[in-house]
Image: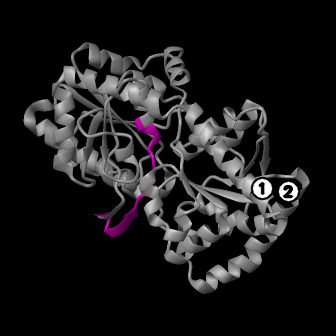
Amino acid sequence: MAGANRSLFALVANLPDDVTPVVVLAGEGEVARHFRKLGVDTRIASPPEALNQYGKAVLNWSPIRQVWEVVHSLLPYTMQLRKLISELAIDVIHVNDIRGAFLTAGAARLTGCPMVGHVRGEVSVSTLHRRIFERACDRIITVADSVQKAFSVQARQKCYTVYNGINHREVVALAKNSPPVEWLQALRNQGGVVACCFASVVPFKGIHHLLEATALLNESGCRQRLNVVVVGDQVPEHKAYQAWLHHRQKELAVENFHYVGWQANPFPYYAAADFTVLPSVSYEQLSFADQVVEVRGGEGLPRTHLEAMCFGLPSVGTKIAGVTEQITHGENGFVVSPANTAELADAMRRLLSNTALRERMGEQARQRVLRQFSVEQYVNGVKAVYESLLSSQRRAA
């Protein structure tokens, strides 16, 4: 249940009665359990293993390999989805990412079912794959205006920005009804300041820059007050990166930097924080463990910033994707250049050293999430795209 799935869940959970959702997932797991608990008709249509790999491995295949997998893997899967769409009499297909569009496009065309593609992050696929996606989708929803820049001029004509929404009251209530994070509360009671980073421990989230910024702050005399907590999954595919982070932490002698792993309910950590940090990058080359890793981002409209706003917390984000559409620099947080450790440390220092500034920015953040990022606005925006699409289909018929 990472950010994209949590945003999809918020949509499905709040759809009006005249929309009946059927959720089709690539496999069993946490996401399927959440939807079934909600009482939503949840189906599993597992793609062949070659098409269901972590990351963007499929996009790095040779053209020959891609053609081979289309014939031997994608075509049979297309026929499976075609049968499912026909049996359920689906009116609109809504795919939650670009990969979903590739897997579903053939079945959509064969059944004549219109498709909405939801782009929740930066578009880092090749020009060919982007064009295929643009042609496959009848409408494209982007989570931020900035994301639309990746598409062709023609495709932008069918793009709609719909900001992810969040149920402010529900989120805060979950935190109040959950056990507090006592060790963080104790640090705050002793005069400490807690900065939380809610992110999986993967390279594009920039945890290494947060570690280096913490070391800079420690050197400048902030060690006794600052406590940095990373709340997020230790993704198995990035064990080498995680090992390098731990090695680097020992080299820098940074003891006030903590990992607490994936949390099914992260909201008590927001309640225990003074501000949040998300140092994501769009592109970067990293050298560790005798290898050079090319890092490509996938950030869109980070949900962690919206959740922080619910708790009246200022955030430090980076100038990528839709972050500047959430955070106005100096108003409800700070926006710094990606991969710039000095800027990141300076923004953190300003929040660390000024309680009044944190409170003022936090209140601005809370007002903004209520005004601009409500779950009602989110659901209404998506439904309006459905209605526009179906209306145009009826006119065409």
Q: Dividing the image into 4 quarters, which one contains the N terminus? A: top right
Residue 53 shown in magenta? no
Give coordinates of residue 268: x percent, y percent. Answer: 45, 23
Q: Are marks 2 and 1 in contact (CB under 8 Å)?
A: yes
Give coordinates of residue 53: x percent, y percent. Answer: 60, 63
Give coordinates of residue 383: x percent, y percent. Answer: 67, 43
Q: Nearer the viewer, mark 2 or mark 1?
A: 2
Spatial CA distance of label 2 from label 1 is: 9 Å
Compared to residue 271, the image places residue 259 above or below, namely: below
Compared to residue 268, the image places residue 147 above or below, namely: below
Q: Residue at x 36, y 52 (%)?
A: 243
* Mark sitting on residue 121: none
Q: Is residue 353 left or right of residue 149?
A: left
Q: Label 1's element?
A: loop
Give coordinates of residue 66: x percent, y percent. Answer: 63, 79
* Mark sitting on residue 45: 1
* Mark sitting on residue 84: 2
Q: Quadrant of residue 199?
A: top left
Q: Which residues are the magenta region?
A: 287-305
Which kind of residue does numbered mark 2 sit on? Leu
Compared to residue 216, the image places residue 62 above or below, namely: below
Q: Residue at x 28, y 27 (%)?
A: 361
Residue 299 shown in magenta? yes
Q: Residue at x 18, y 42 (%)?
A: 345
